[in-house]
Every structure is written in C-alpha cells, then in structure tokens.
Image (cartoon, rainbow, N blue to C red):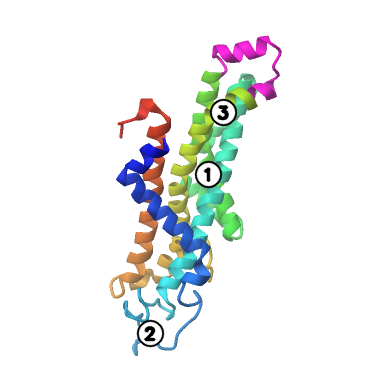
Amino acid sequence: MLRRLLRDPVTLFGLAVILATVLAALLAPQLAPYSPDEQFFDGLSLEGAPLPPSERFWLGTDLLGRDLLSRLIWGSRTSLLIGVVANGFAVLLGTLLGVAAGYARGWLGAVIMRFTDLMMAFPALLLAIALAAIFRPSLWIVALVIAMVNWVQIARIVYTETSSLVEREFIEASRAIGAGPLRILLSHVLPHLVPTMLVWGTLGIATTVLLEATLSFLGVGVRPPTPSWGNIIFENQTWLTTAPWLVVFPGAAILLLALAFNLVGDALRDALDPTQRGRD
C-alpha cells in the first residue's frame, strides 16, 4: 500500500503540502521572520494602507502593519491543531456511537441512530454558528464545536459496517465458543473498522479546516490576536480590492491544505478498499 501511494504523483503532492504545513506549524518560532503580533511603524504606506510584497515583507503587510508571512506561519498552528483535534474527537465519538448502535441494535441502537438523524437534519454550519455563539469562542471551544457537528457522518458509516459485521459467521463462531461482547468488539469488530476510521480521519481534516476558517471568517471562531487563516481573511476583507494579497495568500493556504488532505484521503480509500479503486 505504501509503495502504491508513493508512486502516485498526486498523492505525493498532497503529502508534500501536509508535511510542509506540519513543519511550518512545529517550527513557527524559527521560520517566521517576525512576531505575528508585531506592528511595524514602516509597515504601512503614508496613506495608512498595507504594503505589497517586497524584499523585507515577502507577502506584504496587513491593515495593522504586521508581516503577513509571519501571521500565516503562526496561523498554520491554529488551523492544523483545530483540524486534527476536532476531527480526531469527531472520529472517536462517531465510532463509539456507531459501534454501540450497530452491535447492540434493539432500542439502544434505534435511539442512537434517531439522534444521529436528528443531528444530520441541521445544517452543519448553522449548528456550528449557534454553538459557537453560546460558548465563549476560543481555540479549544472552536475545536469542540466543530467536533460536535462532524461526528454524525462517521457514526452512520460505522453503524452500517458494524451491523453487517455482527451477522458474519466468524462473529457467530466467537459467540459459540464463549467470547464476550467486549472481546468480540476489540478483537473482531474494531480491527475491521480501522481502514474506515483512517480514511475518514484524513478526509475529515479537510472539512474541519474549512469549517474553522468559515467560523473565524464569520467572527465566531478563533478570536484575534491569535492568528488563524480564517480570521486573517476576516480582519482584512475590507482591503480585498486595494490589497488583494491579504485575502489571496491565506485563502490559497486554506485551499491547498484542504486539497492535500482530500487527495491523500482518496488515495488511502483506494488503497485500503479494492472495490473503490479507480472510482471518482
């Protein structure tokens, strides 16, 4: 599987973008030329407008005279951290509820899945905005809010797979020799769900990064001065026509990272599930 992934140039491109973003997030203090909150007296023009890209400020400055490149590098920490933490929690919660509903079935499974259907009926963005408005926005609250609206898809898929698995002959054989529910779940059900969790864990990060950027852009996500790619666009949106680099560069970063995780997730899906190979 690893050889197949490494032979695909599209997957290699996605892995390269993800690796570059991770390194930028981990090495932000060393890579960023300036502090993300440092306002330069010469960072604005005489008219008070942001400066375009130059030798000193490679990506230009923002409306407060701060170096945009430094803010993008530090913002990768926020966007990537929320993407990984929120999606990890969503996958964990969705897997637990999906396995419980698929294995127990009966009234317990019906209650869990009807609750899942109820959550799926709400538009994810509107639900996230409502939850973010209730709680005081912070990095961890935003991650929790995103996780609470993203677990439903993985729960539905895991429920379907678990319901199919518990009818298989090897599960019946395990019950016949006296294996308890916990042993069956840990030894026979969960190992079969690992590929699904891995693929959705990768694909879900792209959705999470986009949702975090959307919430921050709408003003209910990560609050300044903590930099994130979404609130960088939010802060500088009024300069779109006169200083487009303030929106283009963070927007391109969001697009590239989401695309990279989607490409790698699709490659993992094809590699782990032969029935999906070659499909779009």
| Amino acid type assigned to the residue bearing label 2 in the image | Leu
Say left or right for 193 vs 269: right
Query: Does dot 3 land on a helix, a strand or a loop?
Result: helix
Residue 6 point in image, percent of width and height: 37, 43
Which circle, 2 or 1, is nearer the viewer? Answer: 2
- On screen, residue 114 above or below 169: below
Q: Looking at the image, do the residues carrying marks 2 and 1 touch, with CB atoms under 8 Å apart?
A: no
Residue 161 point in image, percent of width and height: 51, 24
Secondary structure that dominates the magenta span: helix
Disc 3: which residue:
191
- On screen, residue 164 above or below 233: above
Residue 98 point in image, percent of width and height: 57, 30
First along the sequence among labels 2 and 1: 2
| Amino acid type assigned to the residue bearing label 3 in the image | Pro
Of residues 89 and 218, the one drawn nearer to the viewer in this rendering: 89
Of residues 140 and 171, the one drawn nearer to the viewer in this rendering: 171
Residue 184 on the magenta span: yes
* Residue range (magenta): 166-185
First along the sequence among labels 1 and 3: 1
Query: Does dot 2 land on a helix, a strand or a loop?
Result: loop
Disc 2: which residue:
44
Of residues 242 and 182, the one drawn nearer to the viewer in this rendering: 182
Disc 1: which residue:
149
Which circle, 1 or 3, is nearer the viewer? Answer: 3
Looking at the image, which residue is at 48% across and 65% down?
75
For disc 3, the neighbor class at 10 Å (few under 14, some 14 to 19, many from 20) is: few
Say left or right for 35 vs 174: left
